[in-house]
Image (tube, rainbow, N blue to C red):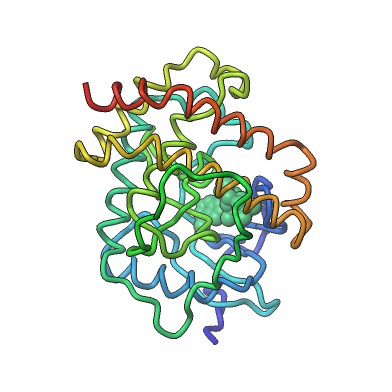
Amino acid sequence: MRVYVRAPGEASDVEHMPAGDVTEGVVRVGQTIRRPHQPQSLAVAGYLDWLEDAGFEGAPRYLGRDAGGRDVLSFVPGRCAGALPETWVQSEDLLASVARLVRRLHGASAGYVPQDHPFPPRTVPTSTIPTTTVHQDPADLICHLDVTPQNVVVRDGLAAGLVDFDLAGPSTALRDACNTAMHWVPLRDPADAWPGWEELDPFRRLRIFADAYGWDREERRRVPGIAIDAAALSYDRMHHNAATLGGGWARMWAEGVGGLILRRRGWLEANAERLTGALTD
Ligand SMILES: Nc1ncnc2c1ncn2[C@@H]1O[C@H](COP(=O)(O)OP(=O)(O)OP(=O)(O)O)[C@@H](O)[C@H]1O
Ligand SMILES: [Mg+2]
């Protein structure tokens, strides 16, 4: 086990970080972040080590565990969106920079195969919602899978870092990029728009994301279907986690996240052609 020893003179004052949905007790201590140790922590640590060796500077470093057993990660300076993303998060330059950062993450992740600590399998119940494609592409890349506005560190108006690798694991670059676009465009029913986000044009914003990430024509054609399938999977997974893990998952479920996901799926289906058009015209 890697043991983190505080650097001499390092500040020890504790600052509580904005609460996320699931992980409680994330605090900043000096230039570090302390998080509860979790079943996937060592798998995440291995991935963060690989990213560091690959020269990817937009991720925290895993520094070990402190005397209380908590994971210690380097603090990535900058600011993140709050639970309801503020209007500064709408910047199109920021949106494009998020796409470029995720593209760089995918480049840096290529070739990574977890050795000592595999990612715990994510148990997903049999789907209750039909998916549109018969088979999914096999997972061929370890990636972040939760690039929300709250998990991107912004400096000088541009995406500089990614934090919160709790959901990282095997998937595909296309699925991770679609998931990122879903959070950042965002792709959701207009009835569920965040306050101050009602007037944004999701078609224009998805195109900005696509151009900045660099999806080819075939990938652009597949995006709506992948987003629709992801909504079905996400519905089942949230439902399952709420029932089996409780905590923040149960709270989100009680607050109606299931309905939000189903409305998103409905909006994506109703607008699939228009989305493809915006991506390919
Ligand atoms: N390494 C880091 N550097 C800078 N800020 C961080 C770092 N890790 C976390 N933060 C800040 O703390 C906030 C909460 O941390 P984090 O995202 O890791 O936990 P969480 O969102 O509570 O977890 P979950 O999404 O699993 O519920 C982040 O949104 C970000 O503002
Ligand atoms: Mg988070």
Whether residue 88 is situated above or below residue 45 in the rendered picture: above
Residue 261: x %, y % from top left: 61, 36
> Horizontally, is 201 left or right of 56 in the view?
right
Residue 164: x %, y % from top left: 53, 56
Residue 256: x %, y % from top left: 74, 36
Residue 116: x %, y % from top left: 44, 85
The residue positioned 49% from the left and 63% from the top of the image is 74
Location of the N terminus (image quadrant): bottom right
The residue positioned 52% from the left and 84% from the top of the image is 2
Question: Residue reaching furthest top?
Answer: 199
Decide which of 196, 27 is in the foreground and name it.
196
The residue positioned 24% from the left and 40% from the top of the image is 215
Location of the C terminus (image quadrant): top left
> Horizontally, is 248 left or right of 28 in the view?
right
Decide which of 276, 29 is in the foreground and name it.
276
Decide which of 3, 207 is in the foreground and name it.
207
Whether residue 278 is situated above or below residue 229 in the rendered picture: above
Decide which of 32, 175 is in the foreground and name it.
175
The residue positioned 62% from the left and 53% from the top of the image is 237
- How many callouts does the rendering have? 0
> Horizontally, is 272 left or right of 122 in the view?
left
